[in-house]
């Protein structure tokens, strides 16, 4: 076991953790935008945005960590994935611009207020869709030859990536609606509860559809699931996911559970994510670029890891602190701006 | 051939990178200084409890929020741009650039983003001391961020501490990489540039208020601080710029020759003249319409009477950057620096004589010079970035070889058009909102916000008067008669 063997494994975990944090944390903020069209009036949209206004920026930073971390630890993967997915990445970036500035501009605007509300909604929706497409294209596999992507500018376009795109939009919407159940009361909360119930069914259905499709993909990323008895020790993941879905359904059917729906949705996402990551392993870009092929030398991976050991706990610490500063219900007449 | 080049993914990618980074750099350049200014204001308020300081804090923190938001969203674009358009650079230099950018995220971006939330929304949620701490964390975060990104940029300008294995850069000594030969100069020059940019915005806005006779008390206080700061920082910046120039002479002589429009060796013992103005003629390798001061170039660039610098003709054309943009951008930067110095010293003199607030010329000068920092900073950035061409990693990796090889012209043309359209719309709107806030000016809080106990509102009291945009003068006049 040399450093060159071990470090890429650790970094696979680090990048996985960073991406999961992003998906969970910005997922619910993007979800708020996806649900924005269901706000009954402008005040309700204010209310929705105010639940996330103090923390959205930190949440989005996990995406930047994912990008920079990937470049540091797996520069080949960074180069191949981003250049092959040029157009979906472009869509995501543009959508995130509109979503991000809407947080500031909407409250400064007078005449263009509705337009920035629309920018918030559409930006969130397209960012989520683009992220789902990127995920789908990655899972589906990127055939490489001599380190170069073989398919053209639209190689990512496929029924499967469209499915994952739409699935992520609904998934984030569920994160958003359960976040609102947690953070609001009365009218806003009941709107959120009404949205959550159908969303749970839709998201579970999408999760099932994507899972059922995986074994038939060319990348055979799920081959590991059905080969050499792997299925038995991996089986807890789908079993837990099913149990999780059941508990989530029960929680959203009750009127007295504020935190459980959100927490269970987070768990549901984490399990789905774990399933995909276990399937992709030991590749960073299926079907052929392994984490060791794509890794930067130990001197690069080790240098960042040394800092990460100290900095990541600190980041998680002050992130927790900032959430605790803004804990509790956010009132409808929060009077912001 | 020319037609083919016009629409090459390389050229389009270069235009796109130049465009998105030029738009991006304006926001951090402003917010780096602004964050420290906010920390200063809040510290003054905590010490004096003078309500004007608090009003100023609430005023500038709103400006900060909008500017910072635009910096964040345009910055995210940057962190993906290396992979989408410059995949060969990422693959070959990712081992070095990736860790530097990762440290920027880990030590700065999270710090800024998280404490920004408390800074903007936490006034009633945390104690004043803790709120001040949050402001300081944001300010420190902006500086740490500058440290890492300038380190990465400097490494590409003056690579050190690496070895090349199969065409891939691998780190040898991280100390040598981070503190590469041009880094200390570039970092100091950049941080000062950011502070000066903010200083001239503050001074410009103050002078504008004073000329219109609104927010007089706030305007006077801010203008005095801007004058004092400029009088120290601008001379310091000129000194640092000179040191940076000497460093460029040592490590990037071709860039320096382009900055100076210096084509050929001087006659022995004649010294190098300083070209004040010229029209560089790249075909004929000479300057047309040249206006130059003999020997001054030697004095400034080598600190000696006869010193020589390497001319452009010492290297083949294929190793030279485009001369005109570097030459002119450098003159714009230096010219603005001199204008800033003149204004700062003139204002200092007027301050001593007690005529600063009544001198129409000085107030007008400050108003006109409001955007000077941004222009000078962009011009300096162009000198830096165009001057290092044709290399992206200086002397080692050509820009032409760094572009994504599989990039389709259609893709990059699409992205370029989309970026231009979106940036003009979005940042145009953002600047419009900033102007609205400037017009309204700092307002007195009618009910000074105090910390809540047990209440659950995330209210940000800063925006109490947002609905009276455009009535700033009236609002403040009324407020000033208050407490």
Image (spheres, coloured by chain):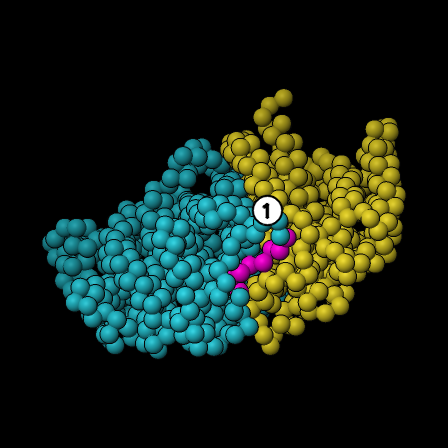
- Magenta span dominant secondary structure: loop
Residue picked out by circle 1: A325
Q: Position of residue A249 (x, y in %)?
A: 87, 47
Q: Residue at x 51, y 58 (%)?
A: B449
Q: Is residue A226 left or right of residue A55?
A: right
Residue occupying the point 56% across, 41% down? A318
* Residue range highlighted in magenta: B456-463
Q: Give B116 or A227, whichever is nearer the viewer.
A: B116
Report the residue at 51% width, 34% height from top. Answer: A307
Query: Image check: B480 left or right of B295?
Result: right
Which quadrant would residue A102 be assigned to in this image?
bottom right
- Residue B211, by quadrant, is bottom left
Q: Colour of chain A?
A: yellow
Relative image position of residue B65 (x, y in whole percent): 51, 59
| Figure chain in cyan | B
In the image, residue B145 above or below residue B471:
above
Q: Is residue B204 visible?
A: no
Where residue B25 sits in the image (x, y, percent)? 45, 59
Q: Is residue B26 left or right of residue B301?
A: right
Task: Please tell me which residue is depicted at 37% across the width and 71% down the height of the picture.
Answer: B215
- Image quadrant holding the N terminus of chain A, namely top right
Please give the chain letter of the residue carrying mark 1: A
């Amino acid at each position: 076991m040399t450093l060159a063997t071990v470090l890429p494994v650790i970094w696979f975990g680090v990048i996985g953790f960073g991406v999961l944090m992003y998906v969970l944390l910005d997922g619910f903020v993007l979800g708020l935008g996806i649900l924005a069209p269901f706000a009954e009036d402008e005040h309700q949209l204010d209310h929705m945005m105010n639940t996330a206004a103090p923390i959205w920026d930190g949440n989005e930073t996990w995406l930047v960590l994912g990008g920079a971390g990937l470049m540091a630890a797996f520069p080949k993967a960074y180069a191949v994935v981003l250049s092959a997915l040029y157009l979906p990445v472009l869509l995501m970036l543009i959508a995130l611009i509109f979503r991000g500035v809407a947080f500031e501009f909407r409250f400064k605007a007078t005449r263009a207020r509705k337009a920035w509300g629309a920018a918030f909604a559409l930006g969130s929706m397209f960012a989520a869709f683009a992220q789902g497409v990127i995920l789908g294209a990655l899972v589906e596999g990127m055939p490489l030859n001599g380190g170069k992507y073989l398919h053209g500018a639209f190689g990512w376009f496929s029924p499967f990536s469209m499915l994952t795109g739409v699935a992520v939009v609904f998934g984030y919407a569920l994160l958003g609606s359960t976040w609102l159940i947690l953070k609001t009361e009365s009218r806003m909360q009941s709107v959120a509860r009404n949205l959550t119930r159908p969303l749970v069914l839709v998201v579970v259905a999408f999760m099932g559809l994507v899972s059922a499709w995986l074994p038939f993909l060319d990348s055979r990323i799920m081959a590991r699931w059905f080969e050499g008895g792997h299925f038995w020790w991996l089986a807890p993941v789908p079993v837990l996911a099913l149990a999780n879905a059941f508990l989530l359904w029960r929680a959203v059917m009750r009127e007295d559970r504020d935190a459980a729906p959100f927490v269970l949705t987070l768990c549901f996402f984490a399990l789905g994510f774990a399933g995909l990551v276990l399937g992709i392993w030991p590749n960073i870009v299926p079907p052929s670029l392994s984490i060791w092929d794509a890794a930067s030398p130990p001197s690069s991976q080790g240098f960042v890891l040394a800092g990460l050991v100290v900095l990541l706990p600190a980041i998680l610490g002050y992130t927790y602190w900032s959430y605790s500063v803004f804990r509790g219900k956010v009132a409808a007449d929060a009077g912001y701006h | 051939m020319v037609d083919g080049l016009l629409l090459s993914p390389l050229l389009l990618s270069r235009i796109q990178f130049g465009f998105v980074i030029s738009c991006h750099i304006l926001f951090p350049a402003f917010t780096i200084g602004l964050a420290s200014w906010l920390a200063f204001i809040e510290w003054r308020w905590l010490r004096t409890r003078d309500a004007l300081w608090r009003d100023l804090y609430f005023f500038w923190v709103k400006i900060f929020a909008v500017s910072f938001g635009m910096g964040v969203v345009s910055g995210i674009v940057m962190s993906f741009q290396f992979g989408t358009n410059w995949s060969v650079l990422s693959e070959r230099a990712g081992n070095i650039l990736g860790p530097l950018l990762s440290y920027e995220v880990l030590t700065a971006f999270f710090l800024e983003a998280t404490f920004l939330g408390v800074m903007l929304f936490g006034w009633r949620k945390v104690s004043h001391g803790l709120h001040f701490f949050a402001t300081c964390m944001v300010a420190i975060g902006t500086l740490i961020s500058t440290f890492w990104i300038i380190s990465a940029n400097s490494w590409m300008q003056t690579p050190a501490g690496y070895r090349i294995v199969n065409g891939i850069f691998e780190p040898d000594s991280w100390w040598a990489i981070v503190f590469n030969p041009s880094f200390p100069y570039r970092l100091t020059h950049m941080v000062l540039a950011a502070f000066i940019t903010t200083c001239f915005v503050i001074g410009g806005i103050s002078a504008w208020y004073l000329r219109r006779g609104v927010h007089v008390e706030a305007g006077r206080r801010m203008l005095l601080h801007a004058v004092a700061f400029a009088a120290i920082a601008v001379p310091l910046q000129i000194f640092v710029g000179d040191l940076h120039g000497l460093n460029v002479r040592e490590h990037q002589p071709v860039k320096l020759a382009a900055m100076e429009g210096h084509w050929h060796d001087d006659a022995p013992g004649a010294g190098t003249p300083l070209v004040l103005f010229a029209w560089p003629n790249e075909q004929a390798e000479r300057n047309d319409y040249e206006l130059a001061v003999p020997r001054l170039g030697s004095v400034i660039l080598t600190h000696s009477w006869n010193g020589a610098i390497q001319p452009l003709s010492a290297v083949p054309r294929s190793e030279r950057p485009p001369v005109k943009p570097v030459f002119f951008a450098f003159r714009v930067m230096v010219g603005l620096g001199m204008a800033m110095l003149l204004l700062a010293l003139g204002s200092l003199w007027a301050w001593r004589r007690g005529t600063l607030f009544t001198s129409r010329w000085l107030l007008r000068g400050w108003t006109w010079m409001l955007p000077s920092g941004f222009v000078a900073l962009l011009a300096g950035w162009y000198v830096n970035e165009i001057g290092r061409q044709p290399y992206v990693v200086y002397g080692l990796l050509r820009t032409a070889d760094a572009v994504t090889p599989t990039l389709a012209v259609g893709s990059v043309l699409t992205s370029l058009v989309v970026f231009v359209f979106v940036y003009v719309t979005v940042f145009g709107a953002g600047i419009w909102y900033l102007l609205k806030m400037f017009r309204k000016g700092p307002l007195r809080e009618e009910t000074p916000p105090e910390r809540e106990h047990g209440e659950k509102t995330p209210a940000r009291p800063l925006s109490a008067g947002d609905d009276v945009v455009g009535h700033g003068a009236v609002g403040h006049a009324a407020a000033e008669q208050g407490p």
